[in-house]
Amino acid sequence: MRVLTVDDHPDFRTVAREVVSATPGFTAVGEVSDGAAALDAIDRLHPALVIVDVRMPGMSGFEVARRIHQADPDMVVLLVSSHDLADTAAARACGARAFIRKEQMRPAMLRGLWTVHGPRPPLPTRPEGRFTPNG
C-alpha cells in the first residue's frame, strides 16, 4: 500500500513515516507540507492512501480531501488532527474515509482503516449454467 503524508509539521511527518513503515504491506512513498504539493505529489507518486492534516496554512485538509476525491473517488483519504473535529459531517462531505486524532495513529489503525475502506476486489463470478436456486 503506497502512502503519502500531507502535514505542515515535520515532526508528525516523521511519526507518520515510522508508523507506515512499521505496518506490514504499507510503504511511505512521500511526504509534503501543504495541499498544493500534495496534489502534485499524488500525480507523481500514485499513492493508494493519503494521510492529510486538517489544519494547514493555505489549503485546508478538507479542501485537499475534496479535490482528491473529485479526481479519484477510490483513493483513500485519512484526515488527521491533533484537535477534536467538531464537525464530522464536514469530514464526510469532503470525501475523506475517516478522521482520527494524530495520537491514535498506529499500525493496527492503518490496517483496520484499509480493511474497512480500501478498495474491494471484484466478487468472483459463477460459470454460466452452474447457479441453482437452492444452492
Image: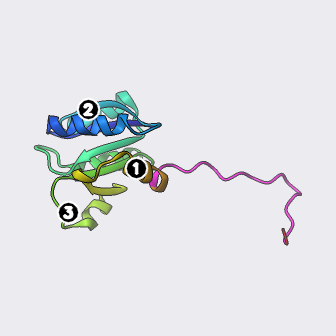
Residue furthest to the bottom:
134
Residue carrying label 1 = 108
Residue carrying label 3 = 85
Task: Tell whether 76 sits left or right of 30.
Answer: right
Q: Identify the amino acid type marked 2.
A: Glu
Above or below, 63 relative to 27 = below
Q: Identify the amino acid type marked 3.
A: Leu
| Quarter of the image where the N terminus is located | top left
Above or below, 36 relative to 121 = above
Which sits earlier in the primary sequence, circle 2 or circle 3? Answer: 2
Kind of element beneath mark 2 = strand
Name the residue at 32% across, 50% down: 78
Residue carrying label 2 = 31
Residue 22 makes an appearance in the image: yes
Q: Where are the magenta residues, as a range?
A: 117-133
Q: Identify the amino acid type marked 1.
A: Ala
User: In the rendered structure, does residue 128 fall within the stretch colored magenta?
Assistant: yes
Residue 39 location (% of width, % of height): 28, 37
Above or below, 31 relative to 74 = above
Above or below, 22 relative to 112 = above
Which sits earlier in the primary sequence, circle 1 or circle 3? Answer: 3
